[in-house]
């Protein structure tokens, strides 16, 4: 095999998804602890002193709210592999950002709260994973706290998600009385010892079945009966069906106490596939050892407030990336040098000299690079672009202090490039009062916060009466503009959107005017790349 292929085989690039408060950020911190990327003082220790200090939640607003708002890239070594971990927002309002990140992943870990099971947002994020065709590992978290019955959770996964859960580790002790786990692959029972505040790797003790039966009593009997049930129902780990997206290997543990984290991280290495050839826009597969190509899936500004820079994140899809190499930008056709290439670890960064398929690289201040762009060396390459979600909330943005208009305009343009919101403009008002279109209302909160904190341009948002949007064209625009309850605005990528004040009126216009172009925007359940 070539060096590029060998290096790609070592990569594991995956995302963590969950409902808010299921423990995703804590699990991310513990992965870093087990991978040696954090000191022995793990994130949960810092969080106990200050709940707003997780490595992956670098944005000040995230630290204030205690939730993930933007996705984060974290790379660390584990065993003989290079792990690229993509931490994603858990709130549904930021599901578009989650989708963009999943385009760069080869698999995902879905974190469930043992007490809550499948929550609405978990289901929505799974649909995004399924559309991407991503293999999905399931981690039932917080087993150290009271929660649902284990078998009930398995039924819930099957009924609501449609995947067959295949337990790989199974708890000894009900939720809230967690003793350890049985690894069904080996039959070994691992008993955990709680450490102070989960600050270090949990000590593990392998206990033979006879001793476990004597020491664990009824908890061991119940676990043994449930394990026999899984054997009879053939709910056994099958790598091929996992990678085909029909089964989900299931692990049980507690991220805050480190119980079961090591086994889950081992499963990431053993089960999630390494990078594979990526389909180009014409469905041809780009070989891993072809000349360099990369796909931009995220743009983020002001990660370091002291530098006020802008980073375009791309996944290496083929070949070897070397810092300083001249690449071609598919959308503009222009070459540019990649002198300022960084690897990012939360908010921290360091210069990266080379990268291989599956790795994530950040280009600093590559001003022309946008989400969905392809970068390549040699013959032209173009990967499919990332579709935008259908907005459901609309508000007019105006700067409070007209003397800060320049900063307001710059900030709006930057947040638009990042995909924080979609920015729509009217030919008459232009940038004076753009309409912000969002999947969820919390996106407006992020816009307001960042415009004021990063650009010094406080704004006021006025809700609009728009309730639905459809894609239209120049030919249909005059007729639509002449209708009551309809407006036509232009998105920054040039797309014309017709906004309707009621879904009833939209349906009527569609029915009575079949000659007008009124295409549905891509929705979460309809995403296909």
Image (cartoon, rainbow, N blue to C red):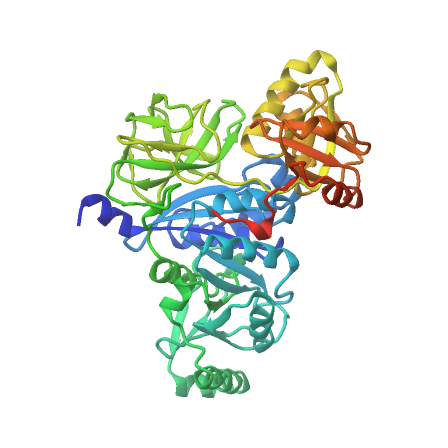
- The residue at the point 25 percent across, 40 percent down is 290
Picture layout, residue 196 above or below residue 37: below
Q: Position of residue 28 (x, y in %)?
A: 48, 51
Q: Position of residue 477 (x, y in %)?
A: 68, 28
Q: Position of residue 93 (x, y in %)?
A: 65, 45
- The residue at the point 36 percent across, 62 percent down is 271
Asked if residue 54 can be seen in this view, the reply is no
Direction from residue 455 to residue 378 in the image, left or right: left
- Between residue 167 and residue 350, name the one nearer to us: 167
Q: Position of residue 437 (x, y in %)?
A: 68, 35
- The residue at the point 40 percent across, 55 percent down is 34
Asked if residue 457 can be seen in this view, the reply is yes
Q: Quadrant of residue 249?
A: bottom left
Direction from residue 270 to residue 308 in the image, left or right: right
- Tally of numbered discs: 0
- Between residue 224 and residue 125, name the one nearer to us: 125
Q: Quadrant of residue 204?
A: bottom left
């Amino acid at each position: 095999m070539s060096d590029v292929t060998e290096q790609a085989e070592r990569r594991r690039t995956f995302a963590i998804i969950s409902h808010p408060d299921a423990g995703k950020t804590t699990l991310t911190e513990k992965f870093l602890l087990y991978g040696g990327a954090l000191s022995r003082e793990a994130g949960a220790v810092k969080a106990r002193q200050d709940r707003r200090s997780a490595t992956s939640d670098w944005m000040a607003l995230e630290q204030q709210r205690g939730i993930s708002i933007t996705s984060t890239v974290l790379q660390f070594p584990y065993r003989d592999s290079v792990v690229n971990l993509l931490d994603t927002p858990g709130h549904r309002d930021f599901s578009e950002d989650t989708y963009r990140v999943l385009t760069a992943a080869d698999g995902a870990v879905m974190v469930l709260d043992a007490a809550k099971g499948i929550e609405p947002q978990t289901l929505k994020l799974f649909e995004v994973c399924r559309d991407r065709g991503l293999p999905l590992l399931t981690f039932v978290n917080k087993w150290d706290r009271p929660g649902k019955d284990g078998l009930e959770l398995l039924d819930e996964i099957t009924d609501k998600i449609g995947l067959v859960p295949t337990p790989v580790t199974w708890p000894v002790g009900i939720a809230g009385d967690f003793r350890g786990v049985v690894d069904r692959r080996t039959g070994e029972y691992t008993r955990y010892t709680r450490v102070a505040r989960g600050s270090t790797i949990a000590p593990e003790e392998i206990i033979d079945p006879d001793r476990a039966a004597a020491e664990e009593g009824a908890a061991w009997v119940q676990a043994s009966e449930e394990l026999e049930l899984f054997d009879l129902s053939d709910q056994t780990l099958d790598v091929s069906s996992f990678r085909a997206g029909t089964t989900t290997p299931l692990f049980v543990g507690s991220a805050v106490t480190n119980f079961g984290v090591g086994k889950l991280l081992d499963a990431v290495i053993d089960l999630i596939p390494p990078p594979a050839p990526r389909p180009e826009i014409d469905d041809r597969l780009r070989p891993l050892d072809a000349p360099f190509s990369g796909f931009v899936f995220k743009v983020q500004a002001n990660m370091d407030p002291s530098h006020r820079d802008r980073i375009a994140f791309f996944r290496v899809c083929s070949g070897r990336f070397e810092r300083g190499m001249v690449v071609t930008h598919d959308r503009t056709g222009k070459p540019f040098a990649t002198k300022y290439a960084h690897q990012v670890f939360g908010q921290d960064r360091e210069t990266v000299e080379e990268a291989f398929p599956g790795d994530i690289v950040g280009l600093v201040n590559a001003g022309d690079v946008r989400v969905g762009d392809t970068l390549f060396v040699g013959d032209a390459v173009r990967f499919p672009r990332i579709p935008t979600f259908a907005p459901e909330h609309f508000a007019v943005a105006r700067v409070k202090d007209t003397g800060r208009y320049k900063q307001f305009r710059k900030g709006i343009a930057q947040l638009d490039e990042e995909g924080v919101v979609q920015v729509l403009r009217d030919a008459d008002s232009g940038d004076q009062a753009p309409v912000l279109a969002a999947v969820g209302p919390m996106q407006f909160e992020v816009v307001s916060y960042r415009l004021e904190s990063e650009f010094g341009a406080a704004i006021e948002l006025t809700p609009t009466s728009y309730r639905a949007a459809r894609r239209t064209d120049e030919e249909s625009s005059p007729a639509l503009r002449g209708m009551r309850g309809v407006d036509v605005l232009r998105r920054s990528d040039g797309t014309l959107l017709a906004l309707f004040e009621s879904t009833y009126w939209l349906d009527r216009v569609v029915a009575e005017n079949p000659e007008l172009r009124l295409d549905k925007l891509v929705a979460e359940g309809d995403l296909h790349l």
